[in-house]
Image: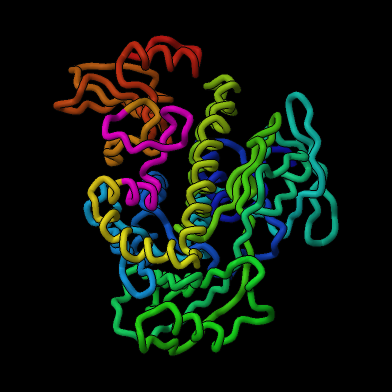
Amino acid sequence: MNSDALVVGAGPTGLTMAVELARRGVDVRVIDAAPAPTAETRALGVQPRTLELFERLGIADAAAAEGVGVTDFKVFSEGKQFLHLDLRGLDSPYPYLLMLQQPRVEALLKASLESLGVTVERPVELVTLRQESDAVEVQLRHGDGSVEHAWTSWLIGCDGAHSTVRHQLGVPFVGAAFEENFAVADVEMDWSLPHNVFHAFLNRGTFVAYFPMPGGLHRLTIAYRPGQTPTGDVTYDELQVAVDRAAPPGARIAKVHYAGRFQIHQRKVARHSVGRVFLAGDAAHVHSVVGGQGMNTGIQDAFNLGWKLAAVVNGHADPRLLDSYAGERAPVAHRLVKGTRRATRMTLLRNPIATVARRHIAPHITPRPGIQRVLRRALTQLDVSYRDGTGGTNDDRLAVGDRFPDTGLLHPTKYTLLVNRAEASCHPDLVDVRHVENGTGLTLVRPDGYIAALDSDAAAVYFETTFGQRKLV
């Protein structure tokens, strides 16, 4: 069976990619080697920026209704609080981190995809891929052992850290691997702390975080230094020892619902695409669980690539538009890997001098308004920007490539042209014109919510470069 696009992997990244393509009329297939969606909790936090993008799919309210909104983040060093982030004043309609388990996120995306007439094909495994100048030939192994030969115009690998697509392309991860080892457990805590606050406790090389979860549970996450990870199953005693070392005195685990171990090697790919094949999500970059960035970054990869690929498939844009996917998302991945490595090293400090500094000096620095703003925007991914190739910005002045802050003004699938003139006309199949009072003249916002142009001349040049049509307004 041939298709315009084949998405390999039906996790959050792959499902988002498929929805973005299908709702723009692209004939898309989605396959996954697993016989059923994962039941493990895995990723947990949905960032405000991701919720803004989910609003464009019509699933933000449903996600918020299921999860726990966390506005306060408190981090302690050897019993003393040295960081408190309050998200309530965040410049977003979703001023909180939503704690919602990955299976529930996937369920919402799957329902959205099925409403568009697309069903995930399981278990179907990509065996090989071979590129031609105008298509990609694939071999797919179905659950009954049969092998299907098919063609697709474009292929997107969203198949995780051990991506078959990446291996087929021969694209390596680059840079030194940064190993992290964790024990995680979904637990009922017996303590006096409020449930809807994130707490993390650092104690001379011990790091234990408590993520609120729906149903009154906490995701207990313990980070181990390389070479110090216990072996075998995670036990109640192991978890309680960590709580004794890194929690308020008297805190106890009342019940363990799930426990397991996992290891992460933080890495990123040498390139995000080869010919007609793209990599997104964990197939392109692997992040620490510290900060809850991984699932969100993959979903945002899909929002960046989805509308561009649909524009090319539908004949609106030149394929060169797709080059901007790697140009924009690779710096974001690099910045996040660098930032999460730094955060992980900070959490596992054992040096007495360093821990004393963290405990006594940091509390005087972190409350400063400028520091608070930078940390809040980084945690929530509102600082992601394509303005200058660095992957992010904290500049107050809006520039081309920045996230457009007033998300309620934007069309869910098209470009949005915001004007304060009495009349304006443009290409209705690509651009939705919205009149705003007290505007600055003209702003063109991309389908993924980032600014494309800030004046009419720049908008006309952008449109000609992207779509081969100069007349905009």
| The magenta segment | 374-398
Label total for image: 0
Please provide percent x and percent y for residue 260: 60, 75
The colour scheme is rainbow
Please provide percent x and percent y for residue 173: 69, 44
Q: Which residue appears at 59% of the width and 86% of the height? A: 235
- Where 185 sits versus 134, above or below? below
Farthest residue, direction left: 438
Looking at the image, residue 235 sits to the left or right of residue 441; the answer is: right
Asked if residue 70 can be seen in this view, the reply is no
State the predominant SS element of the stretch in magenta.
loop
Asked if residue 276 can be seen in this view, the reply is yes
Q: Which residue appears at 37% of the width and 32% of the height? A: 402
Q: Which residue appears at 42% of the width and 72% of the height? A: 210
Please provide percent x and percent y for residue 317: 54, 21
Q: Quadrant of residue 358?
A: bottom left
Pick the residue in front: 398 or 449. 398
Q: Quadrant of residue 40?
A: bottom right
Q: Was residue 321 drawn as part of the magenta stretch in this picture?
A: no
Farthest residue, direction right: 146
- Where 305 sits versus 118, above or below? above
Q: Which residue appears at 47% of the width and 88% of the height? A: 255
- Where 78 sits versus 86, above or below? below
Pick the residue in front: 467 or 302. 302
Farthest residue, direction front: 353
User: In which quadrant of the rendered image does the N terminus lie?
Assistant: top right
Please provide percent x and percent y for residue 438: 14, 26
Q: Quadrant of residue 123?
A: bottom right
User: In which quadrant of the rendered image does the C terminus lie?
Assistant: top left
